[in-house]
Image (tube, rainbow, N blue to C red):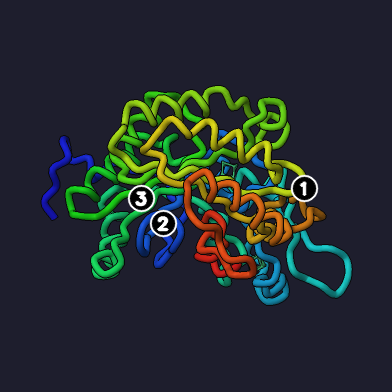
Amino acid sequence: MATHLKNDATQLTGRVINIQHFCINDGPGIRTNVFLKGCSNRCKWCCNPESIRFKPELAYNINKCIGVKECGRCLKPPTPEGAFYVLDGPDDRVRVNWDMASECGEETASVCPTGALYMFGHEMTVEEVLAEVEQDQSVYIESGGGITLSGGECTLQPQFAAALLEEAHHRGINTAIETAGNAPWEKFRQVVEHADVVLHDHKVMDHERHTRWVGTDNSKIKANFKRAYEEFPDKTFIARTAVIPGVNDDEEHIRSVLEFIKPYKNVIDYQLLPYHRYGEGKYGFLGRVYELKDFPYVPDETMQRLRAIIDEAFGRSATTPGQASPQDKSRGSTLQMEGAA
Ligand code: SF4
Ligand code: SF4
């Protein structure tokens, strides 16, 4: 395929978690979502925990282990001694010493015949990603869809992400990004420049609560969004909040976001996504703890009430109570692609 990128940037590599086809609610039409690895935030409710670290990382699904009597390959070199072990008793499936296994890589995963051990994150070139994305061209034509870069924080791989979007454009594919905005401005700008639609998170407006729940200062995020609204007046921005009970499920947060976006005509919508736990299982696969496992779901009435505030601000009629909103699906979880891995 002929490219218009300089210096054959289609051979640039980036760290990809997976490519998910036939996604809705991640930009116009039916999308192909490309999840990139690495994020600068630490949201306690993150549904893609495997996207946070930049390095590829090992995961383990005990349900796929056939036991050491039958197999036991991961107990032998090249796997470091002690990284895997078996408990006393009849269950001979391996357990993981995550302090040691977190240093294991592809070599370890490759010995496992069942896929119980597997890697999150691998290098792909721009060309390889687009070859897969282009398989959905007919779906894009029919639905008005395209490619959406997600993560993780896609703007933290700016050269790769920008090349991917630029080349997608060149091949006639609509482009969107999902971003939480926590990146140095130059990197952020470099990627936004090539996105037709920018889906961006206003997670927590209050500074102290943002630090507590997202793990980072939100002043750079707000500055990036404001500057992007101003420097890219012709792009489509869609603000979003994943509504987390007790964190941002209050009118004050919603009104604060509305106030923030109000001066900018290019912010065409503000969408609310209900809290879900689709990613909870992956914490276990990575040897981590999901801190919000006892959190309640947000009642439908709360979502309706908060959406009504937004509808009023945008001058449109409210979503019918009891009717599923098209937004009732949160930002894509890579779990769907991994088939619960
Ligand atoms: S290599 Fe895989 S299937 Fe075999 S014992 Fe280890 S985890 Fe289980
Ligand atoms: S910004 Fe997104 S990917 Fe990053 S920690 Fe938060 S929810 Fe997870």
Circle on res. 33: 2
Circle on res. 211: none
- Queried on whether the Cβ of the residue with tag 1 lies below 8 angstroms from ligand 2, the answer reads no
- Queried on whether the Cβ of the residue with tag 2 lies below 8 angstroms from ligand 2, the answer reads no
Taking depth in this image into account, of 159 and 13 the one nearest to the observer is 159
- Residue type highlighted by circle 2: Asn
> Disc 1 on helix, strand or loop?
loop
Q: Are marks 2 and 1 in contact (CB under 8 Å)?
A: no
x, y percentage for residue 92? 78, 71
- The correct choice, above or below, for 89 with respect to 211 in the image is below
Q: Are marks 3 and 1 in contact (CB under 8 Å)?
A: no
Q: Going by the image, does 316 lie left or right of 118?
A: left
- Which image quarter holds the C terminus? bottom right
- Which image quarter holds the N terminus? bottom left
Please state which of the two labelled residues, at mark 3 or mark 1, is closer to the viewer.
1
* Residue indicated by mark 1: 291
- The correct choice, above or below, for 243 with respect to 231 in the image is below
Residue at 45 percent of width and 47 percent of height: 269
Circle on res. 124: 3
Q: Who comes first in sequence, dot 2 or dot 1?
A: 2
The local crowd at label 1, few if under 14, some if 14 to 19, many if 20 or more residues have their Cα within 10 Å, is few
- Residue type highlighted by circle 1: Glu
- The correct choice, above or below, for 220 with respect to 53 in the image is above
Q: Are marks 2 and 3 in contact (CB under 8 Å)?
A: no
CA gap, disc 3 and disc 1? 32 Å
- Residue type highlighted by circle 3: Met
> Disc 2 on helix, strand or loop?
strand
